[in-house]
Amino acid sequence: MNAEDALELRPMAEGDLADLLAFAHAQGRNVHREEYARFLALEGARGFVLRQQGSLAGAITAIRYFEHGFLGPVLAPGGADGLAIALLAHAIEGLQRGGASLLEAEATEEERAILARMGFHALRSTLVLERPAGAGSGAATRTERLGPGDFLDLGALDAAAVGYGRKEFLYALMQDYPEGARVVRGGGDVHGYAFLRRSRRGYHLGPLVTREGDLESARALLSDAAALAAGWPLVALAPEESPLVGALSEAGFAPVGRLTRMRAGAPGREVAGDATRATEWLVGSRITG
């Protein structure tokens, strides 16, 4: 191989974002320009790019929440398994060096096959659902706008649902689109929350979390989010067996794809929280979990 043909693997920087988005959009990814910039600002977040003769050849993201690591999508040319493996191996090594003992990813079929060869196993199927743009009220009537004072309750609820703390990520979502950060309250406590954020073609809904099994609050959050995003396509990631899938269908969502939650390793220490149990009805993002 000539020196000019060599691949350079290095940390992702702000200067890579324009090329990264163009690469992602060329592969049909529905990611907004703010998504990667917001991600790189989070504690524990890392991205890596492969460049050849100055051109972007591949990329991956990874984030560590305490002892839990989450791998983002692999951006590589179709069929370039060697590049994908190199990116995944580098991201996994970085997470493990940082102290992550349990690794997860929402994987496409291609990523699932590679991760399985690397020792990951399938945990569940995740549906990618989309509601097309349509008429709607544009007003939220069943939920309230999230405020900074809700984050003590919200943080405990979120940690109970996913097993680790990600308040910084959720706070960033609230700052980016305050009207799309919604809560259901009861007796002065937060019973559930959901976030809307911009995607390339419209909006993405998630995460959506409530107290354990509180389908009524989940439906209220879904209803108001769908109303606020009226006129735009709306995408959500839902565990296939989630009881909320029926409500999503009633709201006009239909499956457009399928992912697999992959896992490797063992849990580390538990994140301290209250005794509340919670359900994550909709996944936040393929980039952040």
Image: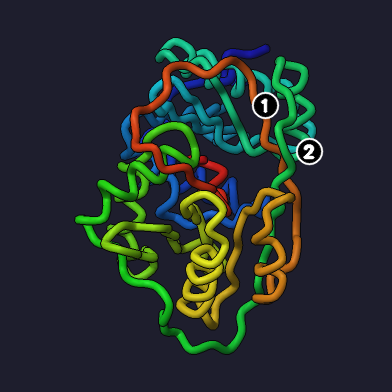
Residue mark closest to the camera, 1 vs 2:
2
**Label 2: how many Cα within 10 Å (few below 14, some 14–19, many 20+):** few
Quadrant of the image occupied by residue 73: top right
Looking at marks 1 and 2 on the same chain, the residue that comes earlier in the sequence is marked by 1
Residue at 67% from the left image edge and 36% from the top image edge: 261
Along the viewing direction, whichever of 255 and 50 lies nearer the viewer: 255
Rendered location of residue 119, percent (x, y): 71, 15
Quarter holding the N terminus is top right
Rendered location of residue 87, percent (x, y): 59, 23
- The relative height of residue 22 versus residue 156 in the rendered view (above or below) is below
Quadrant of the image occupied by residue 106: top right
Q: Which amino acid does label 1 sit on?
A: Ala
- The relative height of residue 287 versus residue 171 in the rendered view (above or below) is above
Say the numbered circle drawn on residue 224: none
Say the numbered circle drawn on residue 109: 2
**Label 1: how many Cα within 10 Å (few below 14, some 14–19, many 20+):** many
Report whether residue 159 is seen: yes
Residue at 54% from the left image edge and 82% from the top image edge: 231
Residue at 41% from the left image edge and 82% from the top image edge: 141
Q: What residue type is labelled 2?
A: Glu
Tell me if 249 is positioned left or right of 180 in this view: right
Rendered location of residue 253, percent (x, y): 69, 70
Tell me if 91 is positioned left or right of 251 in this view: left
Estimate the spatial distance between the alpha carbons at disc 1 and disc 2, rounded to whole Å: 13 Å
